[in-house]
Image (tube, coloured by chain):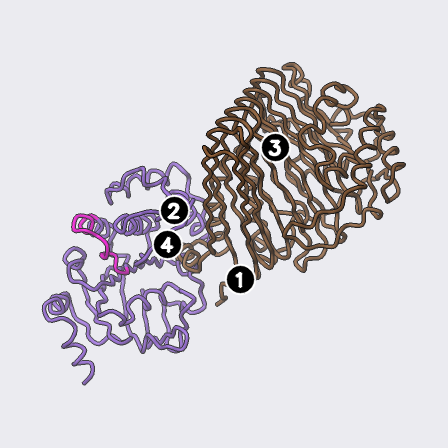
Amino acid sequence: MKTEESYLDEVTASEYKYGFYTDIESDKVPPGLNEDVIRIISAKKGEPQWMTDWRLDAYKQFLKMTEPDWANVHYNKPDLQSISFYSAPKRKKELESLDEVDPELLKTFAKLGISLDEQKRLSGVAMDVVVDSISVKTTFREKLGEMGIIFCSISDAIKDYPELVKKYLGTVVPRSDNFYAALNSAVFTDGSFCYIPKGVRCPMELSTYFRINEAGTGQFERTLLIADEGSYVSYLEGCTAPMRDENQLHAAVVELVALDDAEIKYSTVQNWYPGDKNGKGGVFNFVTKRGICERNAKISWTQVETGSAVTWKYPSCILKGENSVGEFYSVAVTNNYQQADTGTKMIHLGKNTKSTIISKGICAGKSNGSYRGLVKIGPRAENARNFSQCDSLLMGSSCGSHTFPYIETQNKSAKVEHEATTSKIGEDQIFYCKQRGIGEEEAIALIVNGYCKDVLNQLPMEFAVEAQKLLAISLEGSVG
Amino acid sequence: MLKITNLHANIGDKEILKGINLEVKPGEIHAIMGPNGSGKSTLSSVIAGREDYEITAGHIDFEGEDLSDLEADERAHKGIFLSFQYPVEIPGVTVTNFIKTAINETRKARGQEPMPANIMLKQMREKMGLLEIDSAFLSRSLNTGFSGGEKKRNEIFQMAMLEPKLAILDETDSGLDIDALRIVSNGVNKLKSDKNAIIVITHYQRLLDYIVPDFVHVLHQGRIVKSGDKSLAHELESKGYDWLKEEAAL
């Protein structure tokens, strides 16, 4: 009979199941980073001068910065001079229908189970698919357009809605915010833009699938989402990446603006290539995600993180307006040699602001998972409230889990609560399940999904199902 | 149905079972009694396939097949059920979801299709009635925050849903008040047929007033030192175990 330890070893050492590589002709700039490269990117994208200048200014600030090393992760810093900062699938002409999409690409989607036509037909989800750096296809734009909702690539937005972009780009995450945000600001190639007009409730989940593709290409998405007064939107972001040997840098910036009485729900399922079971390869995921809430506004971040070799990510809320609400629900899985330092920042500035943090870490194999969270109560934030719960679940005895909660309060009326637990999947639990006819793998999936329930419940239904599958795949051996 | 021959089992270097012989036929109820530490729970764990124990000699046959090489889940698929003395908590997994998974995994292993949801729901309602369980129970997290009595009732509810051939009830009476004991015992009796068998492990005679055994065995220091009919249980109740220990020492 197998011991629990050897079993965990076996199941946690499973290979990445979404590892495949699509062969699409790419158009890319030579490796390296300098002002000329930034001008080339800007020119290739047909950008106006103000955007080129904005990028160059970001680059100047970037040059003054150094890569941060305070996170609880260890890796060889990527050599930015060996990365090609622009790569786009070669487009022969504008695409009118799915028939015109590169068949290789359609195959990729089929493998991921997210074929566009199926998505269109079954789920009513509008898709803005980003393969490498260029948006290949945007659907449902017309229907959304009737309601005044803008959902397009950020490149199109720069051309078509320059006033909105100029007004909000870089206001939540300034170009000088941090090393990777500055880099992203200088070289971002694509991403999504979304604007929900006053009082409009977006009738469907907006969804974008990101995918890193070309070998050696860093991916720098930029997402800007604006919910105007009294509006509501639920936005889904999910991704898988092909198996690669070399490290791939992913440094995205996401900015959310929730104006008075608006609500944004932002859900992510992240499954970048985590490296093989010996810790070779894998994506570096250094992301800056932040939202700002005006009066009575609400931003809710939900994330299920299973991928990447190294993750550095803190979706945050600035609760500027009074009565605004910030929420963060997170499941972060690390396996094999993965490292994740993730959490959130809740910055309470306005009166009666409220925030909730539910973080569920799962560590398996020889991985290391850290929760790092800041709750900051400013001097004017009368009656601010925060509740944080940070749980860790360990599988086996070679992994590590760490919690770094930071609390800063400058207002005596604040109430901040923090709870934390650490547990192990017990042999008793597994035996109990097995006695009822539930095999070991299924038992682990059941226990893990139960543990993550509070977070998974926050995801839209279809996404929750996908996330459950992903958790099972990430933690189990080759099922079936 | 179950035939245990000269079973020896260790945990670590310590021998707990020292030559158990036991045969259980369909339709029978066997009670296993004995003082603390005599090996009662070890015996049930070894039959169910817990990996902490090592069988050093002898074997367990179930319906003519040696169980030694089977994992706990494979034994469950063959129809062996253990009602735990201390059922574990699984937070976030509802009773319904757990039972549904258990039933469908068992069906899958037997090459059957998953049970249609409406049939499952109907069966659940029926068995809940049998055990006087409130429907709110189904959406609670498995055993999480359950009282001792609720946990035991939940065990028998699962037994009712899984319909095992052999059920081992490990101290199902502990933690039950007299009303719950009556309800649970009634449930067990209604599930009993001439095709299935039950092994009741208990310290006390009182459970055996409700679930009446055909055979009573006394376990002491890893061996069955005396077997008899239900009158043996009464004898133990009045005289305690000491006379048996002395007898066994001779």
Disc 3 chain ID: A
Residue, disc 4: B88
- Tell me, what hue is chain A? brown
The label shown at residue B99 is: 2
Residue situated in front as seen by the camera: B31 or B5: B31
On whether residue B176 falls in the magenta region, the answer is yes
Q: Nearer the viewer, mark 1 or mark 4?
A: 1
Residue A442 visible to the viewer = yes
Distance in Å between CA atoms under marks 1 and 4: 21 Å
Q: Mark 4 belongs to which subunit?
A: B
Chain for disc number 2: B
CB within 8 Å, label 1 to label 4: no
Q: Is residue A166 above or below residue A337?
A: above
Q: Amino acid at mark 2?
A: Ile
Q: Which residue is mark 1?
A: A397
Which quadrant would residue B223 be assigned to in this image? bottom left
Identify the magenta region: B170-183
Amino acid beneath label 1: Ser
Chain under label 1? A
Chain B's colour?
A: purple
Numbered circles on residues, count: 4
